[in-house]
Amino acid sequence: DVKVTQSSRYLVKRTGEKVFLECVQDMDHENMFWYRQDPGLGLRLIYFSYDVKMKEKGDIPEGYSVSREKKERFSLILESASTNQTSMYLCASSEPGRLPPYEQYFGPGTRLTVT
Amino acid sequence: RKEVEQDPGPFNVPEGATVAFNCTYSNSASQSFFWYRQDCRKEPKLLMSVYSSGNEDGRFTAQLNRASQYISLLIRDSKLSDSATYLCVVNMADQGGTSYGKLTFGQGTILTVHP
């Protein structure tokens, strides 16, 4: 059974803290993604990775960085958390290759609150 | 203009009703199209892919009109369990013609089916 796990369901951090969100998938997928989801804005892509040590900016990378040292693990880093980064963060993975169906499997999400 | 736009909703319908969701996308080079479903406080999951010829999965029918850049989802005989947010999703190739499985999500339409 496909599984994507995220390190925390709920997280509360203070402004200026460095925050690490971890994502692990057990499907041997090459592609991994980080999104944030906000009411009225939908899911927006922050960063993605198509291979170990490879990363590409998504639509809203500012204030974030990522790390992919192992195939199964993709980390999102908030270098200095700000209140406007309060959001639901969703990790996803998908099968390799450039053909459809591109189904992405999502983790349960991390609700991050920055105070 | 948003890359993927959906009916704002919310839709509140009685059990047994037929309900239709519409979606438009802006990039004519888009390659693949999907509907995802997201239950309250859960992660998105693939509901169905959308093909040019139209496709049906039980009570769900998806249609794609490439000329109009329009996607639809029809739900017949609505059930209480259909209550969820429905996300229109498009895979867009980048300038090099590849996409690495990147998906662009609409903001979602909330459906509530009541007894």
Image: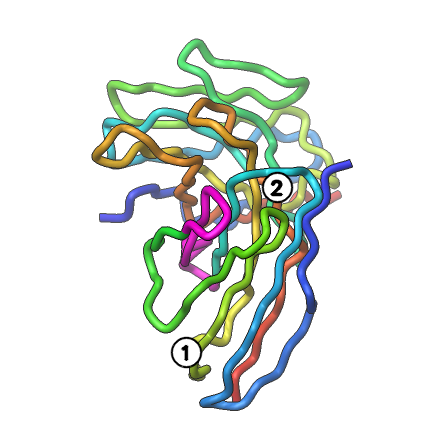
Q: Position of residue B22 (x, y in %)?
A: 41, 33
- x 63%, y 46%: residue: B84
The amino acid sitting under disc 2 is: Tyr
Q: Please indicate whether residue B13 sits to the left or right of residue A16 in the image.
A: right
* Residue B86 in picture, x, y percent from top left: 54, 41
Q: Which residue appears farthest toward the right when viewing the image?
A: A1
Q: Determine whether, in the image, residue B16 is placed left or right of residue A63.
A: right
Q: Which residue is at the front of the view, A98 or B20?
A: A98
Q: Is residue A90 magenta?
A: no
**Sequence-earlier tag: 1 or 2:** 1
Indicate the position of residue A53 as horizontal and vertical percent values. Answer: 46, 52
Q: Which residues are magenta?
A: A38-54
Q: Residue at x 45, y 38 (%)?
A: B88
Residue B72 visible to the viewer: no
Protein chain holding label 1: A
Q: Which residue is mark 2?
A: A105
- Could you tell me which secondary element the residue under label 2 belongs to? strand
Residue A99 to residue B40: above or below: above
Q: Which residue was labeled with disc 1?
A: A84
Foreground residue, B107 or A23? A23
